[in-house]
Image: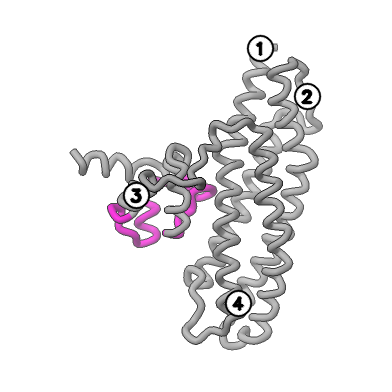
Amino acid sequence: MEDFFAMAATQTTVREIALQQPTSIRVFERFGIDYCCGGRKPLEQACEERAIDPQTLLDALAEAVVAGGEDGRDWAKAPLGEICNHIVDTHHAYIRAELPRLRFLAQKVVARHGETHPELKEIQQHVEAVGEELLQHMQKEEVMLFPYITSLERSQENGARPVGCFGSIHNPIRVMMAEHDSAGSAVAQMRVLSGDFNPPEGACPTYRGFYQALLEFEMDLHQHVHLENNILFPNAIQMEDGEAATL
């Protein structure tokens, strides 16, 4: 019977587990498993790609449920406006504060070690590209999409449906999700190039600090995109489609 349940769990997608068990997010981060953009694959496949024993991961997920903690907040039950505010105040703020530091560290490490470790230059290029993309992405969300979602939720109470400049909310969400995929792909490439953010033996403190910063950036981006792709956007679409059906 235990083998049956383990098999069922490994066939569940990473995304579904992250939604059903919020405490799983830290576990996925620890094992380097993408639960947002790359979360549409079964757990078994994700383990195979990362060379992880599925049972080891299942045991860690079970332990996380018992441990609980503040990281286990179920955002799927939060108001959409609250989710928008949390994303802006936590994840957007983090990116804006961290990008200058990442760029500085990348420049310093490339200047010192770029000749002997050419992968650093590629990582630096990814940092620059994903940084520019995310800054524009966040601006679009804060100026247009998030205010519309907040107004859409408010209209459930007052009946005054907001009018967006983009037609259906499906349109900007489709663009935002494509940009998430692009940023996620760039971060995944940085993980590969850096050997899972593991600095070479004898690396200087700046080198180690750069890779640690990249790891933390990836973790925050995964949390950020998970909230949008898996919770905020589907609920906003459902809300708008529900209102349209009643008109």
Which residue: 47% across, 56% down? 29
Q: Which residue is mark 1?
A: 246
Scheme of colours in the image? one colour
The Cα atoms of the two marked residues, 3 and 1, are separated by 45 Å
Q: Which residue is mark 3?
A: 63
209 is within the stretch colored magenta: no
**In front of the other: 118 or 12:** 12
The Cα atoms of the two marked residues, 3 and 4, are separated by 37 Å
- Along the polypeptide, which appears first: circle 4 or circle 2? 4
Q: Which residue is mark 2?
A: 162
Q: Secondary structure at mark 1?
A: helix
- Along the polypeptide, which appears first: circle 1 or circle 4? 4
Residue span colored magenta: 31-56
**In front of the other: 209 or 40:** 209
Tag 3 and tag 1, C-beta contact below 8 Å = no
Q: What's the amino acid at mark 4?
A: Leu
Which residue: 76% across, 29% down? 167
| x and y percentages locating residue 16 in the rendered image | 44, 39
